[in-house]
Amino acid sequence: MHIQSFVIMGVLAAILACKQDSSRPTGDPPPDRSARTSVELSILYGSEKKTWLDEQIQAFNAMSPVLGDGRVIHVTGKAIGSGEAMTAILDGSERPDVFSPASGAYVTLLNQAWQSRDGHTRPIAPPGEPLVLSPIVIAMWRPMAEALGWPNKPIGWRDILAVSRDPGGWGTFGHPEWGAMKLGHTHPEYSSSGLLSVLAIAYAGANTTRGLTAEDLPKVESFMADIEDAIVHYGKSTGFFSDKMIERGPTYLSAAVLYENLVIESYIESYARPRTLDLVAIYPVEGTFWSDHPYSVLDAPWVGPEHREAAAAFLGFLRAGPQQARAMALGFRPADPAIKVGAPIDPAHGASAHDPQALLEIPDAATLDALLAAWRRTKKPADVVLVFDKSGSMQGRPLEEAQRGAKAFLATLDARDQVTLLFFDRRVYPAYGPVEVGKARRELEARIDGISADGDTALYDATLAAEVLLEARPKTAVHRIRAAVVMTDGDDTDSAHDLAALVKRLHREDSGPAVFTIGYGDAPNQAALEALAKAGAGAFSRGNVDTIVPIFRDVGSFF
């Protein structure tokens, strides 16, 4: 199918080239294409469709399509989380011509935020046409889904809750070896799947499929909190959960809110290793949403008539049969209802072309804002140890920017979250905390501001100390996301413990604290930091003095 689509695209390119030159009399010299100027069409799009859109942008540009005035269209695209893209448009750091989030819900939120600003009297983003479709699903390991009655019994959020709230966990369903229900979904302020999963949970709590209002939310907060209690941690990327779920298996996550195409992709890609367990897509019986990937040409000062013409040409290309067929080969459903849905959207790839049976309604912007406020009150609180390298190589601007980044990280956390500060150089210093952010924010910031750089680097000892602190926490009625966030600008030089032993300790069969690592500057041992993050079921980020502040903010999306 892939080869066929590019053959067809080649034919289209030839036809287009002929049409472009059809008005030129026979025998005339060809026009000087090098003298033409081009029009750049920039698209900011949800990262879930990166593989497909990257292919199509490359194919479209290879055709050298032109506007009516002869200027060549050149498309550029940037994959980014839907919530992050919305924020970037609002703060002016991104100025795309086309916004294509995973869900139209983010178009609604963008318009509301845009119109709340001075001088903006009309929406910036029209609804737009869908490019592809993919339902929001609960991805679960096949044996676990079967233990709940799948595929013969419809499964939903209340089944997740039943396992989560049962003291016996999966043992009540005949599998004590699976432990407790471990759920993952993305942060709703960063990601479409997170926003829609929280909205679906609210609808399930309200026992309705339409007409959810802000007034309904206080009545469902208890239900939302009970579901959120099963969360392992949040995140910025839906693909992150899919990758980590495949990599770590059921000991990391029992279930995660993903897009159907990611479940299908887990079969197609095989993740460079034999599959021992399959994921299946559960379409919640209470209802779910289509991730509709709207193509919204912005009504913004920087979008001119030539960009609108170019955007229309690229939209027509994307919605044509060959491009839609390629999207289906990657696990998406075609936006054109005339195209029959087929493999790989089938039981052999953990999916069902006949589902979802119940669809939910996306409410207005005021209700979505109220939903996010309700989620902040009901989200699972975090217990984070911030491990901060203050070795001598951090002197000067590196230390100043890292301090700014650490304080930006604190700003992303909820008042109920607990933080422990753990500074290290050639030794690991006594920890400060845990303290609740809402009660000790000023003291936390003052301690970060008060550090100075000196000495070598005991990275492994500091990471181990953070893990020991988290494991020693008393088991209380308040369950928390447990994680270490480790930032360093150098290789380990002074630890009593080695990397291999630390990785083995972090990569346990039970669910220990997650480990997120940040390599700062030019000298960190990236391989070691990646190994620690992989063993701790977290993520690695790389930054420098110019990017460390946004990287720290991004790490905050996990909590």
Image: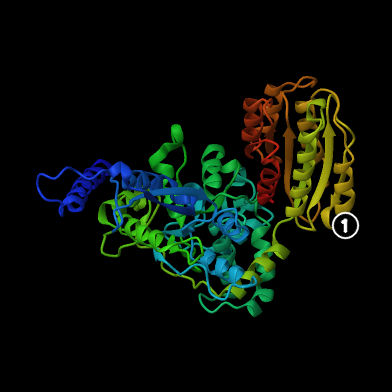
Q: Would you say residue 47 is visible in this rendering?
A: yes
Which quarter of the picture shows residue 297?
bottom left
What residue is pinned by disc 1? 439
| Residue type highlighted by circle 1 | Lys
The reply, left or right, for residue 229 in relation to residue 446 is: left
Tell me which residue sits at (80%, 58%) in the image: 415
419 left or right, relative to 171: right
**Could you say which is closer to the camera, residue 459 or residue 81?**
81
Q: Residue 72 or 376: which is nearer the viewer?
A: 72
Q: Quadrant of residue 211?
A: bottom right
| Residue positioned 15% across, 51% down in the render | 24
Quarter of the image with the N terminus is top left
**Residue 366: percent from the left, percent from the top?**
61, 75
Q: Image quarter for residue 121?
A: bottom right
The residue depicted at 90 percent of the width and 40 percent of the height is: 450
Farthest residue to the left: give it.
Answer: 26
Drawn side of residue 437 relative to residue 219, left or right: right
Q: Which of 95 and 393 is in front in this view?
A: 95
Q: Is mark 1 on a helix, strand or loop?
A: helix
> Picture coordinates of residue 380 (x, y %)?
71, 56
What's the residue at 22%, 44% (across, down)? 10
Q: Position of residue 491 (x, y in %)?
A: 72, 23
Vertical side of 287 occupied by 150: above or below: above
Residue 90 image point, x, y percent: 60, 61
Does residue 205 show up?
A: no
Q: Is residue 273 left or right of residue 534?
A: left
Numbered marks: total: 1
